[in-house]
């Protein structure tokens, strides 16, 4: 049996509650659109994580599940707390911690049983609609059960497991139609099962310690099982149990697990889509897609369903956005270091872009340095959905400050020169609304097709040194001389401001 004090969703929620980062919604809320709208408005107000405890149609005494939790990772503060860090940690330190810990491993531990098997549903008892899966957005094609569910599969050749976040919609009481992209890790597993003509076993985990969401939604190397990395973050092995009907392992203290198989027969595919994607736009048209045929549902008593409101909007971005802000920056920094690109001093992803745009700060070593950065990022598998736009800035530009970036682009970028480089026809996101539908056809192309762009917003070295600029190649800024600034700061309290206390506003 898994130990009662093992990390799980409930212990994480207790920690967030104690830190004032979790609110419980006690009024009745409709699972159909209202719950998602409450979540969006809470994001706009920069509110806490939400635990809904009174959900229409699921608040009676016979309800199998009556709770939904969302927005757990929807702020840098909550991410830091859940990773065991100081919630006020700065971006560079947080990204550095994630970069290092992503490379550490703690082997999971297989146990005989656990709370996730307190209830086992088979045969006619399998009914996905017994759980309060929201209809998140009004334009969604249905109830999306897989939003932050970790989909567990195993490479049939190497035996290495994978946990990934992939979207899936309830197609029937015992079926989930999935968006399955061949270039993703489980897509590679799927390709081998297709070659063999065999169904692929799948287990989806809805609700465990949020470190699972944090890592399952990130491109960990394909030869590494996410469970090993989760153990490194938690500082102890992840306790796993064997599934009841498929040859896979899941966290012993998970809230809810759905087991099943995806048939290679296209005639058994079901319609999936559209869905309000992380881009903030409705993605795709209804399309027949690979479908999980459920063989078992296992869950804890009084389970909490874990889901998330996808879709980044200005001022109201959610969990995937903030998670991507950290993980995509960390993975990019590691990729740049591994490629031997020098002088990387900070990497930042503004949450609203989910990593589609990335800003890299450098201590410039040569005139082609920015192109070196872009080439290294675009050559990685992590670039499938991310790094469409790469902006490179100097060490005096704060990459987290859009006004600073805008200033650098305004006065350090020369349109028509190689400060702006477009790299056409690369593999890329199949859900980017700016890409024509014909260039998003996974069936025809294997992925989407992207034109990528580098903006080199660093000071050029092409100007000759100027004696009047102290030998610099680029004009100096109007920032005060250090000695003048020291003088003013030393006398600040003496100036006698009226109508202002001299502090920040």
Image (spheres, helix red, strand yellow):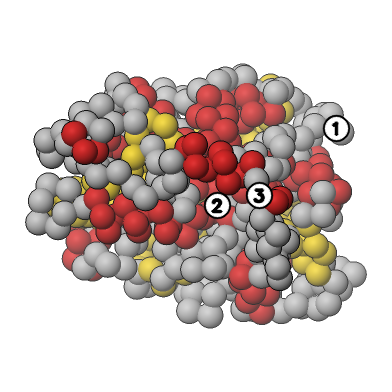
Residue 501, by quadrant, is bottom right
Q: CA distance from mark 1 to mark 2?
A: 28 Å
| Residue appearing at x 86%, y 48% in the figure | 18
Q: Which residue is mark 3?
A: 492
The mark nearer the N terminus, 3 or 2, is 2
10 Å neighbourhood of mark 2: few (<14), some, or many (≥20)? Answer: many
Q: Which residue is mark 1?
A: 5
State the quadrant of the N terminus: top right
Residues 288 and 234: in front is: 234
State yes or no: discs 3 and 2 in contact (Cβ < 8 Å): no
Q: Nearer the viewer, mark 3 or mark 1?
A: 3
Asked if one can make out residue 499 in the rendered structure from this viewpoint, the answer is yes
Q: Residue furthest right?
A: 61
The mark nearer the N terminus, 1 or 2, is 1
Residue 183, by quadrant, is top left
Q: Nearer the viewer, mark 3 or mark 2?
A: 3
Q: Which residue is mark 2?
A: 322
Relative to residue 458, is residue 313 depicted above or below?
A: below
- In the rendered structure, find residue 144 and report the number of the disc placed on it: none
Asked if one can make out residue 171 in the rendered structure from this viewpoint, the answer is no
Residues 395 and 27: in front is: 395
Q: CA distance from mark 3 to mark 1?
A: 53 Å
| Residue appearing at x 21%, y 52% in the figure | 413
């Amino acid at each position: 049996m898994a130990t009662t004090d093992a990390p799980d969703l409930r212990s994480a929620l207790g920690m967030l509650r104690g830190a004032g980062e979790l609110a419980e919604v006690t009024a009745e809320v409709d699972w159909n659109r209202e719950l998602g709208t409450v979540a969006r408005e809470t994001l706009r107000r920069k509110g806490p994580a939400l635990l809904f405890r009174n959900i229409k149609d699921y608040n009676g005494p016979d309800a199998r599940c009556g709770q939904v939790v969302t927005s757990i990772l929807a702020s840098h503060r909550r991410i830091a707390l859940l990773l065991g860090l100081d919630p006020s940690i700065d971006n560079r330190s947080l990204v550095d911690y994630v970069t290092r810990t992503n490379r550490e491993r703690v082997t999971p531990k297989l146990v005989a049983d656990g709370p996730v098997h307190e209830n086992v549903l088979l045969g006619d008892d399998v009914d996905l609609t017994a759980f309060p899966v929201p209809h998140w957005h009004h334009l969604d094609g249905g109830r999306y059960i897989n939003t932050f569910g970790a989909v567990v599969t195993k490479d049939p050749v190497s035996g290495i497991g994978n946990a990934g976040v992939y979207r899936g919609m309830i197609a029937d009481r015992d079926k989930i139609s999935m968006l399955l992209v061949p270039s993703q890790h489980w897509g590679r597993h799927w390709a081998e099962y297709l070659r063999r003509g065999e169904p692929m076993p799948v287990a989806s985990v809805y609700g465990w310690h949020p470190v699972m969401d944090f890592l399952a939604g990130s491109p960990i190397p394909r030869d590494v099982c996410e469970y090993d990395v989760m153990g490194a973050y938690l500082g102890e092995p992840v306790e796993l149990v064997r599934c009841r009907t498929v040859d896979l392992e899941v966290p012993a203290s998970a809230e809810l697990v759905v087991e099943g198989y995806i048939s290679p027969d296209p005639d058994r595919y079901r319609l999936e889509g559209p869905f309000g994607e992380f881009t903030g736009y409705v993605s795709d048209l209804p399309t027949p897609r690979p479908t999980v045929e459920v063989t078992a549902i296992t869950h804890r008593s009084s389970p909490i369903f874990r889901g998330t409101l996808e879709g980044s909007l200005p001022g109201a971005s959610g969990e995937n956005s903030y998670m991507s802000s950290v993980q995509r920056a960390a993975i990019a920094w590691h990729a740049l270091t591994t490629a031997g690109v020098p002088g990387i001093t900070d990497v930042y992803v503004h949450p609203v872009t989910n990593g589609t745009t990335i800003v890299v700060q450098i201590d410039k070593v040569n005139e082609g340095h920015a192109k070196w950065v872009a080439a290294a990022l675009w050559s990685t598998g992590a670039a499938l959905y991310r790094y469409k736009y790469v902006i490179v800035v100097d060490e005096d530009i704060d990459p987290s400050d859009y006004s600073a970036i805008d200033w650098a682009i305004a006065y350090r970028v020369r349109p028509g020169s190689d400060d702006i480089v477009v790299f056409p026809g690369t593999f890329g996101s199949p859900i980017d609304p700016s890409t024509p539908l014909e260039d998003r056809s996974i069936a025809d192309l294997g992925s989407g097709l992207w034109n990528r762009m580098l903006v080199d917003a660093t000071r050029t070295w092409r100007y000759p040194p100027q004696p009047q600029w102290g030998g610099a190649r680029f004009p100096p800024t109007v920032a005060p001389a250090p000695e003048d600034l020291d003088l003013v700061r030393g006398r600040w309290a003496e100036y006698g401001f009226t109508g202002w206390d001299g502090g920040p506003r």
